[in-house]
Amino acid sequence: MDDPTALADPPTTAPNARSETIYRHRLATRLWHWINAITIFIMIGSGIGILNAHPRLYWGQYGANFDHAWLDLRPYGNILRSGWLTIPAGYNLAISRRWHLLFALVLGFGLLVFMIASLINRHFQRDLRVRAKEIGPRHLWADLLAHLRLDFHNPEDPAAYNTLQKLAYVVAIFILIPLMILTGLAMSPGMDAAWPWLIELFGGRQSARSIHFIAASGIVLFVIVHLTLVVLAGPIEEVWSMITGRWTLPGARSSEPPPPPLAEPEAAE
Amino acid sequence: MTLLTRRTLVTGGALGAGLLLSGCDKLAQQPGFRRILFSGEKINMGLQRALMDRNALAPEFTPDQMSPVFRTNGNSNPNTADYNRHVAENFANWRLEVGGLVDRPLRLSLTDIGAFPQRAQITRHDCVEGWSAIGKWQGPMLGNVLKAAGVRNSARYIVFTCADLWSGAPYYESIDMVDAFHPQTILAWAMNDKRVSVGHGAPIRLRVERHLGYKNAKYVMRIDAVSSLAGIGLGKGGYWEDHVNYDWYAGI
């Protein structure tokens, strides 16, 4: 027996399998992804804890019990106060704030470092640049239909993000998270003294608080869609690639588990 | 990917998130992690102080931007025998005591307080709970009162002791000298052009505008300059700080 592998796999697929693993996610992307996964989780849980102290939202500079609230979440108090949703599990404004305001620093400075790293390693320019032709209605429609067919990859460039995916990442990285940070800062009375433009930017502290909540809802929506698509696209390959950076091209994946290692050929004795 | 593994992964993910949530609470109870969690306050304070001009002013507003109703919160009436007597006398015999690390301890009547140069400001009151109310406050700058008392260089904090009792002990708060000498830090005796009401802290309410509501102590009876917060209350610088772990630095 000269070639043991010849017995295990049909020769047509075996030679390609290994060469179709590519380096897809750079170190900065992977680090930020996992730090952010934990940070966003903590920010949402502790944020709901803080919201529960006064679950009413207003527009403008001021807003309290006797003013008109555009959104009153008190009817949903039982859900918003459920222990599986908040950090800490029992209502404790002080401890929710401790979590929120420490991890706000991780979120803010993490985004800053990731943005600088992604400009240097050209992740933004290479992977996230949305070209004009991509956002034409016909292209977007085709992309949407492809998503509905669970067909996420362009066979000619399978590693590239598709347009809707790019737009989701661009909205999260360049709009939602920066908006969370800026509206968060605008709610700080100290920062309003240091940077009065924060309040002018959002039209008042209560408007900033409302926008903070809306952007947070956008992030929750992003997380739900993101996790759903990870599951649909092949969760083991996707999660593994976000840990190691190495990603197996969809065409090269085998649905069977790899064959067990062959016993030593008898001829070797 | 078979459905079975997919389902296992989703269930595993949900379970993992649940464990992470309850793990957060367990972590927060460990002294080592709690120190890290609570270090955010000092980092945020350091960053804000580094970014902020020492005298940077909190935003001020115009009369038409004021809240139609400025709600009360916390204690809205100390209701002790002494306090009720002062209310009945319209605070005619009430005196604000200024002491601690000062060369000339003071006992100030409302007339004395009105004789200092006055500052009026329309500012936003931000409760830690999230709501805001805009009102007009007037009174002398705390810095001028401290100068009149001859505050010593060894003073690092100003402590405010109040008339309202919480579990038998008076409410108290403290600020450092940066905030004590900030131009908008005033001892307000007037709110919205009237004497401060009992609900809002009569006769004197501290306004420290770059901080959340709980720093803006109502019913101020005594002001002490001190070198350390240790030994006052439980040593964390305020009633809420002592009892429920609110941040002492409330600029955020």
Image (cartoon, coloured by chain):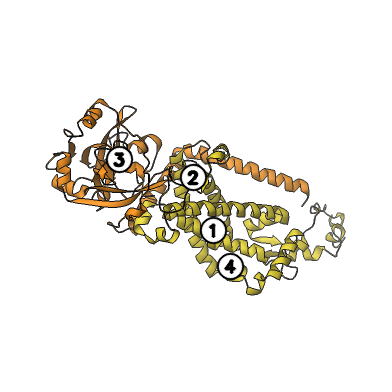
Chain colours: A yellow, B orange
In what element is the residue under mark 1? helix
Sooner in the amino-acid sequence: mark 2 or mark 1: 2
Question: Gap between marks 4 and 3, in whole Å?
Answer: 51 Å
| Snapshot quadrant of residue B213 | top left
Q: Nearer the viewer, residue B241 or B217?
A: B217
Question: Gap between marks 4 and 1, in whole Å?
Answer: 19 Å
Q: Looking at the image, can residue A249 be seen?
A: no
Of the residues tagged 2 and 4, which is closer to the observer? 2
Count of labels in the image: 4
Question: Gap between marks 2 and 3, in whole Å?
Answer: 25 Å
In the displayed structure, does residue B229 sit left or right of residue A88?
Answer: left
- Which residue type carries mark 3? Ala
Question: Gap between marks 3 and 1, in whole Å?
Answer: 37 Å
Q: Are marks 2 and 1 on the same chain?
A: yes
- Which residue type carries mark 4? His
Instruction: Give the residue displayed 16% in from the left and 33% down from the top.
Output: B93
Residue A56, label in figure? 2
Residue A11 percent coordinates (x, y): 85, 64
Instruction: Give the residue displayed 45% in from the left and 59% down from the top.
Output: A202
Residue A187 percent coordinates (x, y): 42, 52
| Snapshot quadrant of residue B13 | top right
Determine whether A129 is above or below B251 in the image: below
Residue A11, label in figure? none
In the displayed structure, does residue B245 sit left or right of residue B93?
Answer: right
Question: Gap between marks 2 and 4, in whole Å?
Answer: 40 Å
Which residue is label 3 attached to? B217
- Which residue type carries mark 1? Leu
